[in-house]
């Protein structure tokens, strides 16, 4: 896709990008074999591992986990009341959408405890690639590896299609909150790991992305989104920290990719 060449103009030294099509094939541009920091895109891979654990009966989404009154579902949906980083809750479970690295770590620890192994080992048993650090932001691997995650979310085989459908349904609807680095939304809709675009505007995805779009971006300057209505996924990794540049470059790239895929203004 010609649109992918936009990354050559990004202010990073290294950038790789890929679009994944409905049959799982992909078009790529850049050094897709260079290990780069996924940062919070890691949370999507962690969420899939958590959902595998739910399907295996190791844990239940509605079992107690985290602060009093919180469940695994609260933790995965950033609704447990835990802060961005820190062990002491700053809200009651289900009261606010507070994006929390700690909440994802607590969820992972609970799964590891129930599975009888470190979560990193359970994660690798699901993915066949290493977590390498925090389940909230620890992966440093090439874009070719991120394509495995994109394909799983586009064409699930580790989890059932019904499980993925629940994961991209709003959890604890109506919660307001801040999407770090982007802004406050009312509501700030989230699934079981993935952020949901829904009516958010402006957004880090494209103006032509459908409201059904879901995914995650990372402070390392990369992202992964899937648009079920368009039937494609787009992912990118860079060596430049997330900033204002990304909020300009990422939507332009998304819109160009969707236009090449036959989606243009008025179609979504």
Image: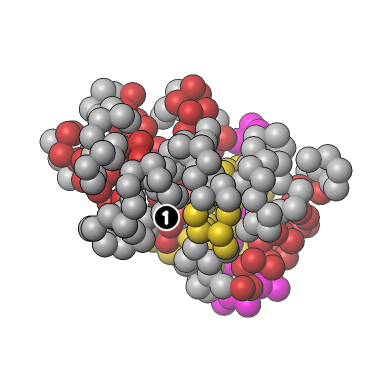
Q: Position of residue 33 (x, y in %)?
A: 49, 59
Query: What residue is shown at x 36% (from left), y 61% (from top)?
Result: 84
**Residue 133 visible here:** no
Residue 244 among magenta residues? no
* Classed neighbour count for the residue bearing mark 1: other residues with Cα under 10 Å, few (<14), some (14–19), many (≥20): many
Q: Nearer the viewer, residue 71 or 92?
A: 92
Q: Is there any visible trace of residue 261 in the rendered image?
A: yes
Question: With respect to residue 192, does 222 lie above or below?
Answer: below
Q: Nearer the viewer, residue 145 or 237?
A: 237
What span is in magenta? 7-24
Identify which residue is drawn at 40% across, 38% down: 48
x and y, in percent, of residue 163 in the image: 45, 26
**Residue 32 image offset from top left, x and y in percent:** 54, 58
Left or right: residue 243 versus residue 63 is right
Name the residue nearer the viewer: 248 or 36.
Answer: 248
On the rendered structure, is 200 left or right of 63?
A: right
In depth, the one of 22 and 116 nearer the eye is 116
Quarter holding the C terminus is top right
Residue at horizontal 42%, vertical 61%?
Answer: 39
Determine whether 119 is above or below 90 in the image. Answer: above
In percent of width and height, residue 232 lies at 66, 40
Image quadrant assignment for residue 183: bottom right
Name the residue that disc number 1 marks: 99
Would you place residue 160 above or below residue 127 in this image? above
For mark 1, give the secondary structure.
Answer: loop
């Amino acid at each position: 896709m010609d649109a992918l060449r936009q990354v050559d103009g990004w202010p990073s030294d290294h950038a790789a990008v890929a679009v994944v099509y409905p049959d799982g094939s992909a078009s790529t541009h850049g050094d897709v074999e260079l290990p780069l920091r996924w940062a919070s895109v890691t949370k999507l891979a962690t969420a899939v591992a958590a959902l595998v654990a739910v399907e295996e009966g190791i844990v239940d989404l509605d079992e107690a986990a985290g602060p009093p009154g919180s469940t695994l579902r609260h933790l995965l949906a950033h609704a447990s009341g835990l802060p961005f980083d820190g062990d002491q809750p700053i809200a009651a479970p289900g009261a606010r959408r507070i994006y929390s690295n700690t909440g994802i770590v607590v969820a992972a620890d609970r799964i590891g405890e129930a599975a009888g192994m470190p979560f990193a080992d359970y994660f690798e048993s699901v993915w066949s690639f290493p977590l390498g650090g925090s389940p909230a932001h620890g992966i440093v691997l090439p874009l070719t590896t991120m394509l495995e995650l994109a394909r799983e979310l586009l064409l699930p085989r580790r989890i059932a299609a019904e499980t993925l459908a629940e994961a991209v349904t709003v959890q604890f609807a109506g919660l307001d909150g801040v999407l770090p680095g982007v802004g406050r939304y009312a509501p700030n809709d989230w699934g079981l790991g993935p952020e949901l675009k829904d009516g958010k505007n402006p957004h880090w995805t494209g103006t032509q992305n459908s409201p059904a779009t879901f995914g995650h971006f990372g402070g390392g300057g990369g992202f992964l989104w899937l648009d079920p209505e368009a039937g494609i996924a787009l992912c990118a990794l860079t060596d430049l920290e997330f900033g204002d540049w990304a909020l300009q470059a990422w939507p332009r790239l998304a819109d160009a990719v969707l236009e090449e895929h036959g989606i243009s203004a008025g179609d979504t």
